[in-house]
Amino acid sequence: MNQLQADVLVVGGGTGGTAAALQAARRGAKTILVSQWPMLGGMLTSAGVVAPDGNELAAFQTGIWGAFLRELNHRQPQGLDNAWVSFFTYHPQIGANIFADWVKAEPNLLWIPEQEPLEVIKQGNKITEVRFNSCTIHAKIILDGTELGDLLELAEIPYRWGWEPKDQWQEPSAPIELSTLMKTTPPKPPVHGGFGGVQAPTWVFIMQDFGEGNIAPEIDIPPINTPELFTNAWQNYDIESFLNYGRLPDNKFMINWPIQGNDYDQNLDRLIGSNSERLQFWQESFYHSLSFARFIQIKLGRRYGLATGTFPIENRPNFNINPDILSAFALHPYYRESRRIEGLKTIIEQDILPIENGYTAPLPLNEAGECEAIAIGNYANDHHYTQFQLTLQPKSLRWGGRWTGTPFTIPYRASIPINTDNLLVCEKNICVSHIANGATRLQPVVLGIGQAAGMAAALCIEQGIQPQELSVRTLQNALLTDIIAPQAVIPLFNLPPDHPDWLHWQYYYLEHPELYPIDGNCPASSNPRYPAKNSHAFEGIFQRQSHQDYRFTLTQGQFTGQTWKLVTLYPEINEQLQNIPTPSFLKVFGRLNFSGNWLILEGL
């Protein structure tokens, strides 16, 4: 068996693991990235969630997340404005190619695909080696970037799984008592606290409109076929809205439908059980999604079928399914929740909710009074269960003509376990409550968590220290000034990363966290915003319906007489829209999104 050595070992090539490995290598650490699947990117690629949520505003498009969006725009000429659930949708292979190309470009980074961790070797409180199928790797700093926190189990590191009741942290949305639906089996060591019953995973698949008059291949009846579960899947939506939820270019559709769709949460404790138990869950989840695909085809007609050839078919569970069918399905389920470490800092619901009368969550402070934020997010708290609805405290606001989530931050110590010296986590396995995980689990946030963990690992190598000894200010400075993908650590609505004062105000609120504005707007002057090259000019009548609700009726061109919702991701335009008299005749620049009936403004 091969024996390899590295400064930094990242186990898991998902969203966070890929970002961590890239950042560690770019900082100069000799890094090895080991992934289970032949595609890098996890949720964003191999799990098929090619309609990422959150951090959509221009001010929050920083770090590797911002770089990923720019590269997607470059590589997908049809654009990213295709769906209504997200401003950004793309073909899975394009996303995977971006990550693979970035990894290959780093001389300090070795990627070993299609390997799973089998054993962890420890000396005292340190992990010294990790054994995989065909190699053993010794590293100074190790990062767990697996989808389900598998390294935590192998290393017997305490973690949480499932629900915590209200009396644990007094979270507003936590249940006072756990119902039988929230419980499965009591926790066992090394699980500390929580009861089984995490958020529902989804096996995502891609469908295609073959065009009027064309016949798509019939989708076979799966071994487990449950059409009765999908009867009301799009009851409150028309067919077009259902399909356009995750529309991709080339008349394809990501099917990740939350309402009586392909979420699956039967006996979820199997995911952290034996390999055979996890495989059994995978098979059931896959058949559930295949049954949903067949249901869609029966209801909508044979014009619609599976988009074969979307995903690779080698080195993945095949469930004895036709390879053409298999190639329309993601390589593995989309996991919304993982094992979660017991760390030095636990993120709870109060840490992600906006301050009273404000629009931002409080900045996290350590015992010395330092702000310890290392990544940002803004998605609304979103939980998925198939058998009940959970009422959650709201964390949304109207901004740019639409609803968006209120921002929050991730503290550095949430990535550090309490009793292991040389380990960081960089996926959904951070130290977070079950309730707060509904906001911290989203793809852009996890990219930011991964980038910060990778930077922290490289800095520890430079300084010859352990993660808990690293100065958070040193880490923040390295993230803010990274040459390739500088990452924001303070969320500010009106300060996009191309603003000339961006770095000044990031540092200002790190040094003066008590002055952080509760409305999320710093006193920086507005920066001129010029339309992108692919923007189009439109003329029409502007109407303000209500606060942050705008309409625009076109008076020229192909769509004359049609009324569109005006939305924007740019703070300068958001400010202008609030001050335009209504009604007004305007010439604007932007792009039409037919799925959301939006005119996305980039210039006025």
Image: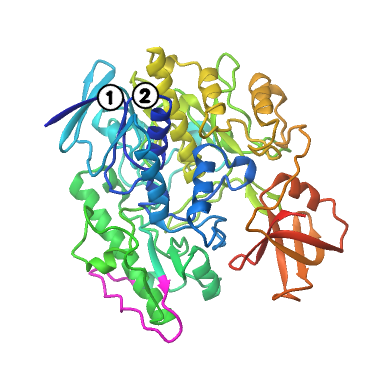
| Residue 130 image point, x, y percent | 22, 29
Q: Return the disc, 1 or 2, that comes first in the chain's sequence.
A: 1
Q: Circle 2 — which element? A: loop
Q: Residue at x 60, y 16 (%)?
A: 369
Q: Residue at x 51, y 42 (%)?
A: 67
Q: Is residue 290 above or below residue 275?
A: below
| Closer to the camera in the image, 255 or 136 | 136
Q: Give the alpha-carbon distance from disc 1 to disc 2, as whole Å.
A: 8 Å
| Residue at image location 38% in from the left, 50% down from the top | 96
Give yes or no for contact between labels 1 and 2 (Cβ–Cβ under 8 Å): yes
445 left or right, relative to 290: right
Magenta region: which residues? Answer: 208-226
> Circle 2 is placed at which residue position?
29
Q: Which residue is mark 1?
A: 6
The answer, for residue 180, to whether it is visible in the render is no
**Callout 1 secondary element:** strand
In the rendered image, residue 320 lying in the magenta stretch gets the answer no
Identify which amino acid the numbered label 2 is placed on.
Ala
